[in-house]
Amino acid sequence: MRDPNRIDRMLQQLESAWRVFPDMRLGQLLLNITRAENTSELWNLEDAQIEQLLDSFAKLKVDPQGLRYVKRRWEENRGDRHDHFGHSWWYFEIDPSCNVVRQVEHYDNGMILGYSSRIPHDDFGGLSSEPLNASLDGFDFTTDAEFNQLWKQRSNS
């Protein structure tokens, strides 16, 4: 028989992680937790393994100071029915493993789109489901203030 005390322990670990990243959907959070071990096979993981992953996730990522903000210029049109938006700046709020928590697209025509777990996609696009390359080549660091100013101005909130 499995230890029934594990339930409270694991729920506390999960709650702690989720409170730091409240914009993540539960499924997104669980996949990010298991991604640290390069596995998405939640079905086959024993509870003891998930407890270890939760512990590792907490040590690596559950640190609000660990969020970083990067941006990158995209010098191409969208290639879709919204080509008239023009070129764009893409801003990302990322965790220490470069998973995208929130994303802002600021187009030359003034359109500002934002995505998070609350608005993962719409008719214009969606939140990146893949982590950014850990080297962050081609990205410039920006501030949380610049990111959040654009976040507040988004058209699709």
Image: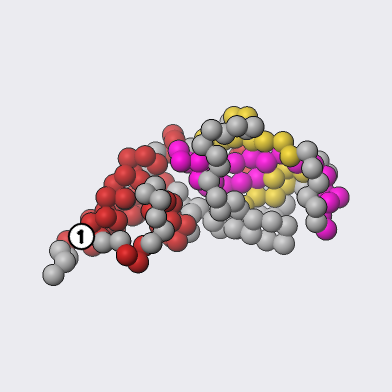
Camera-nearest residue between 51 and 120: 51
> Secondary structure beneath disc 1?
helix
Which residue is rendered at x = 44% and y = 35% of the image?
A: 66
Percent position (x, y) of residue 32? 43, 52
Residue at image coords 80%, 56%: 80
Task: Judge by depth and name the residue closer to the eye, 136 or 106.
Answer: 136
* Rendered view: 32 above or below 141: below
Quarter of the picture containing the N terminus is bottom left
Residue range of the region highlighted in magenta in the rendering: 81-104
* Image coordinates for residue 131, horizontal then vertical, percent: 53, 46
Instruction: Look at the picture and state if 151 lies above or below 14.
Output: above
- What residue sits 37% from the left and 49% below the top? 37
Side (left or right) of 51 relative to 124 = left
- Quarter of the rendering containing residue 44: bottom left
Q: Is residue 126 left or right of residue 85?
A: left
Residue for badge 1: 6
How far from the left and from the top, in percent, is residue 129? 56, 53
Quarter of the figure that contains the C terminus: bottom right
Of residues 157 and 87, the one nearer the viewer is: 87
Q: Could you classify mark 1 by the number of other residues whose Cα lies within 10 Å: few (under 14), some (14-19), or many (20 or more)?
A: few
Judged left or right of residue 33, residue 148 is right
Q: In the rendered structure, does residue 100 fall within the stretch colored magenta?
A: yes
Q: Give the mark count.
A: 1
Say whether residue 97 is visible. yes
Outermost residue toward the bottom in this view: 1
Q: Residue 6 placed where, x, y %?
A: 20, 60
Name the amino acid type tagged 1.
Answer: Arg
